[in-house]
Image (cartoon, grey):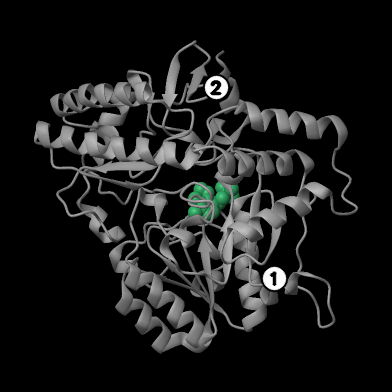
Amino acid sequence: MTLAERARRVIPGGVNSGQRSIPGLTDLVITRTQGSRFWDSTGREFTDYHAAFGPPLLGHNDPDVAAAVAAARASLSLTGVAVTEGEVLLAEQLAELVPSIEKVLLTSTGSEATFHALRLARAVTGRRLVVKFQGCYHGWHDAVSLNVISAPDRIGRPDPTSTGILPEVLDATLVLRFNDVEAVRRAFADHGDDIAAVILEPVPHNVGALLPTDDFLRTLREECTRAGSVLVFDEVITGFRHALGGYQEVAGIVPDLTTLGKAIANGAPVGALGGRADLMEHFSSRPGGPVFFAGTYNGHPDVVAAASATVRKLREEPVHEHVFRLGDRVRRELDALYRRLDVPAVVTGFGSVFVTYFMPGPAPRSYDDLLANDASRFVGYRRHLVEQGVFELPLNLKRSHLSYAHTDADVDRLLEATERAVGAMLADGGADDLRHTSTMGGARH
Ligand code: PMP
């Protein structure tokens, strides 16, 4: 029996997170990672553009992060009785770097960070509603477990990703179109007094990359300020990856709370929730009752060391310069490739993140625009890419990531392999099993 078969006997679905069970790749077992590469149990090598949904911005097994973790491990493990110096230094750095962060707490995952952000917002405002946007994913917990793809006819009516969620929880969430300024104004006009929080990915990377308009982000800031609602930027993907200060630094809009994860520790399990001191202070014990916050592994010395080493490297080395340059090159040359092949495609993304939608332009601004994307082409060419040892996740609407470990030679190979993969996809017509489905077939993480 293969390892994958044994996995399916003892692990539900054979994997430990949704969307690791990929049609056509259910026998894949990973054995090794290094830099821009991973290897499977049959010895096949893949250049990794999936990057675990985003954490390894420096590349897999970054030697400086690994050394920092080893050094921490040699002298300190978890006691759970008080703060450590590493936690203080990391919090000071986050407060210095991220415009909205005055105080910050560490979690182990991004989902915990968004969970606590929304609980805090409800606690401090005494209000019920949370506004989220189509195309944005914020974790697995009930308050946000709504399909990132709420179909257009379900706008305002959440579409749960899971069974077992109380209808009351779903009823307390409004789903709006991303970049729809009018919808935001209307939601605040109709429900402003009851809106505790607005949460968004400033760039909804969970459906590839929808770039926000300045007007949209400014409107969110204005309406939240006017109504006394808490504006939460979920920067679990964009934090550190797009800038040390997150996308809020790029956009020049300061939210009230920010959630971080993924790239902040280059793959070690850590999330963070930070923001205005007057809000974050509610997490400390105080008369009138704190907002409860806890976690056995929060601030674990290993992950704190990983995060601190990641920050140090991002500050000291031209990491952003490198990944932005490669990202621009990939987008520019892929765009030229699709023009040359006369294949309708939109190549988009930001910095180190890139994605190609198989649709006519212009670049999509909301999930509705993505209904024009040809899912069978999107998945089909990626299946051919994987066959060539170039790993872009063959699931609809998934983004790809570059890291500091990727080189121009990797990009040369990516471009050559893409040309062959697109040719093969055009010859076989795309992914058979997706030909009759729309893009509604689920997209998250
Ligand atoms: N927010 C965003 C924007 C995410 O992309 C994710 C995970 N993909 C999460 C929150 C949840 O993070 P985690 O999987 O670490 O719980």
Q: Which residue is drawn at 65% across and 30% down?
A: 64
Earlier sequence position, callout 1 versus callout 2: 2
Q: Which mark is residue 280?
A: 1
Query: What is the secondary structure assignment of the residue under circle 2?
Result: strand
- Front residue of 243/190: it is 243
Question: Looking at the picture, which amino acid does disc 1 mark?
Answer: Met
Viewport quadrant of the N terminus: top right
Looking at the picture, how far across and down is residue 251, in whole percent? Answer: 41, 63
Looking at the picture, how far across and down is residue 291, in whole percent? Answer: 74, 72
Work out whether 34 lies above or below 326: above
Q: Which residue is drawn at 59% across and 83% down?
A: 127
Question: Where is residue 46, by image quadrant?
Answer: top left
The mark tally for this picture is: 2
Question: Where is residue 331, by image quadrant?
Answer: top left
Tell me if residue 151 can be seen.
yes
With 143 as the anchor, is 415 left or right in this view?
Answer: left
Q: Which residue is drawn at 59% across and 25% down?
A: 7
Which residue in the protein does label 2 denote? 34
Question: Looking at the picture, which amino acid does disc 2 mark?
Answer: Gln
Tell me if residue 141 can be seen.
no
Looking at the picture, how far across and down is residue 349, in whole percent? Answer: 33, 47
Question: Where is residue 393, by image quadrant?
Answer: top left
- Front residue of 31/299: it is 299
